[in-house]
Amino acid sequence: MSKKQEAIGRTVAPFGAFEDVVPAIEGFVRTYNHTAQGKKSALKGLSPEATFRKHLDAGWAPTAMSRDEVRAACARTEERSVVQGAISVGGRHWTCPELQAYQYEKIWVRVPAYHTPAELLLLDRCGERVGIAFPDVECHPLDKRGAKASAERAKVHRQVVRDLDRSAPDIDVAARLIARGQAQPDAVPNEPVDIASYDPAKRPARIVMPKGASTSEERRREQDERIAVQMDLAKRIVG
């Protein structure tokens, strides 16, 4: 735990800026790769570079793997809801231009299983790649940059909707319905089993015609008859 010292009583002098450290480390590693190892080492007296070249001459070739494949192999698939062009994973919001133009409510995310992600692979409902999401930058409510970013996302979303509208064919719904109706077969009714008619000559049943209007004397006579019938009934009841 003692502090490193360049010499007794003196601390290590600073190497320099980061731009100076990188080429120095690369030079040290390259020197090591071209330095022969001991006879008793695993490389049997060869340098790492010579051992690597030996395998190349024997036909060895690497298997390439993209960054997306690495993400897919070491991650689990989780479903997320797309809200205003962003998703929530691990308590943070993530977004990207492809996600801001996404037209569905749900999207599938490949969440790394063994480390905290710096970016997330997004998949659609068919398992096809949508894009790579990065942590969303949160702005203070009074920061104008937040409003500007929201407006740009809304603009991207509206543009995608307009592009979809232009790509969709124009359909005359009324003409389609009329053509569909005309293409349907007509139902042919059966032959009638009988014929109804109002002609008395062709009608077996007799129709009772209403009586004509009665005169005043006939009405008075009918009224007297009804009164007489009622008086007769009253006498029989009284006795």
Image: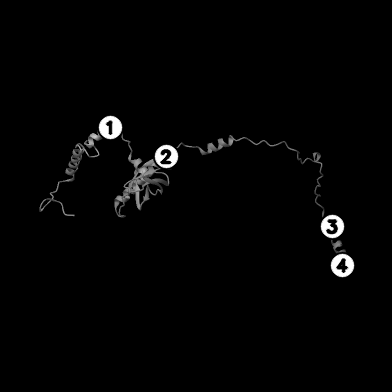
Q: Residue drawn at (42%, 37%), measured in percent from left and top?
A: 167
Distance, label 4 to label 1, CA atoms, is 138 Å
Residue at mark 2: 164
Residue 56 circle label = 1
Specify the amino acid type for callout 3.
Glu
Residue at mark 3: 222
Specify the amino acid type for callout 4.
Ile
Secondary structure under badge 4?
Answer: helix
Q: How is the image coloured?
A: one colour
Pointer 1 or 2: first along the chain = 1
Secondary structure under badge 1?
Answer: helix
Pointer 3 or 4: first along the chain = 3
Secondary structure under badge 3?
Answer: helix
206 sits to left or right of 80: right
Is 169 or 31 nearer to us in this picture?
31
Q: From the image, which quarter does the C terminus lie in?
A: bottom right
Q: Are marks 3 and 2 in contact (CB under 8 Å)?
A: no
Secondary structure under badge 2?
Answer: helix
Pointer 4 or 2: first along the chain = 2
